[in-house]
Amino acid sequence: MSEPRQAQSGGASSAAGAEVLAISGLVKRFAGVPALGGVDLTVRAGEVHGLLGANGCGKSTLIKTLAGVHDADEGRVAVHGQEVPMPFGADGLRTRGLSFVHQDLGLSDAATVLEHLALDHVGASGTMRRIPWEAERRRAADLLARFEVAVDPDARVDQLTPVQRAMVAIVRAVASQELHASGGERRPQLLILDEPTVFLPSADVAILFRLVDRLRQAGDAVILVSHDLDEVLEICDRVTVLRDGLNVGTREVEGLGRDELVELILGVQIGAVTRPEDGTERGSQVALSTRGLSGERVRGLDLDLHPGEVVGVTGLAGSGIEELTDLVYGVRPLHGGTVVVGGQEIAAPTPARMLRHDVVLLPADRKALGSAPRLSVLENMSLPFLRSAFRGGRLRWKALEQQAQDTCVRLHVKPADPSALFSSLSGGNQQKALLGKWLDTKPTVMLLAEPTQGVDVGARREIFRLVREAVAGGASVLCATSDYEQLVQLADRVLIFADGRVVDEIAGDAITKDALTTAIYAGAAA
């Protein structure tokens, strides 16, 4: 992960500790129902402030209100000690020193890094003029160098790695605020990062957090929205937890325990993290096997997956776990080896062939690979059933809608509305809907890649329960993840990957976070 948190005084400006943002009694209602019920929040210069809470707690509404997407109904907001009259307008608080980086980053794949930075710079003048590209290229290079982002200004966004894209988005956001800055002493800025690490591996999170720490050292403030509590406890100075549209507590991170934070989010006490005791026994048959499976990173994998078990796969970034489920499912081409399902070899696996053999995949990037965000919940959940629902030249939408509705209710998807746009659901509810869709196919094998990535602690529990219920019913599960706690709660045995190979296996009660950590780093060093 990232380097240890630095003291706020290290390199911070003289304004460190002053309130950059002060929110008091902020209320936002939709159709008379409060999404924010009177939120109080203060953010200081030179701090990283975590904003936490379960899906639907009000985090997104708060951020969209500050960004000008929604108008608040009541409350007061001050920036640098000056109250800002409401409504804020379409630009929100951007002209007051706030900048936003959302989960989708707001970058165009077809444009270059230089074009993104130049657009903001030239556009800020408000006049039509020819763009001095050489000067803009030098300015872009200077900006990237200042933030130690090793990216070619002429590179297109679709040529960048995920972490490079996130860093470019942050540099762009900070640079755009500097354009609004008035003369005289520079005032601290506030950067709001809305789940920037959801689809990043651990090594890339560490790189991104070094950039965040440089902003803190410069005296700026950062609000970090994240569901990854370990990340929050590592990088943040203080955290604020929202529940049901209210601030239920702000805490200093120093001395704050993970369990205390989880209890604050959920509003209930939790027990220790333990393996499930559901009485499930592994079957003697082999549901899925691989022999000599090889890809870009995975090399010569032999694996047997039995009914009634969860096999976890974990390792450091680059160990091969990132591509394993895609290889088995045929999303990525095999470089060698075979895949056998139910005793039948699948020649040249493809998703269609694997699905016909009752094998399903829940990919790590649900937005890009696991769903169609612009379609409705119903359309997303009906995709595997379109052929069976097509009868007499007509598609039986009523039956599909009822099935989707029943699944949403059973899995506590909120809102349980099949007509809702899929992208309007929170991350946890999207994941439950996708998992429910595949469970409805009655799979024999489930391939899960980071199944709780970007999901709140409440939704995690629901997903764990659903997976274990499927396993108790005789399904087999292969779960590739870098989340050790997830493996403690889900897995019957865990394969440790290093350099594309299995270097260790841990089973049963021996699966603990300490044991997994030790095995992973021992394997990487071997």
Image (cartoon, grey):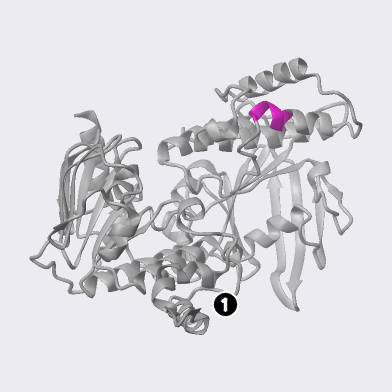
Q: Please give the name of the residue rendered at 76% of the width and 19% of the height, measured from the top-left corner.
A: 133
Q: Is residue 486 above or below residue 170?
A: below
Q: Height in image: 235 above or below 303?
A: above
Report helix, strand or loop for mark 1. Answer: loop
By secondary structure, the bulk of the magenta-drawn segment is best described as: helix
Taking the magenta stretch, the answer to whether it contains residue 479 is: no
Instruction: Read off the magenta span.
Output: 112-117
Give x and y (percent) for residue 476. 22, 64
Frontmost residue, 69 versus 275: 69
Q: Can residue 178 be seen? A: no
Question: How far from the left and from the top, in percent, is residue 316?
Answer: 32, 38
Q: How many marks?
A: 1
Foreground: 80 or 172?
172
Residue 168 seen by the camera: yes
Q: Residue at x 59, y 33 (%)?
A: 157
Give x and y (percent) for residue 24: 77, 60
Residue closest to the far left = 284
Q: Amino acid at mark 1?
A: Asp
Instruction: Provide the residue designation for mark 1.
Output: 417
Which quarter of the rendered picture does the N terminus lie within? top left
Front-most of residues 342 and 423: 342
Horizontal and vertical percent position of residue 393: 48, 79
Q: Which quadrant would residue 496 be assigned to in this image?
A: top left
Q: Is residue 372 left or right of residue 450?
A: right
Asked which quadrant contains residue 345, the reply is bottom left
Q: Is residue 113 magenta?
A: yes
Question: For the C terminus, which image quadrant?
Answer: top left
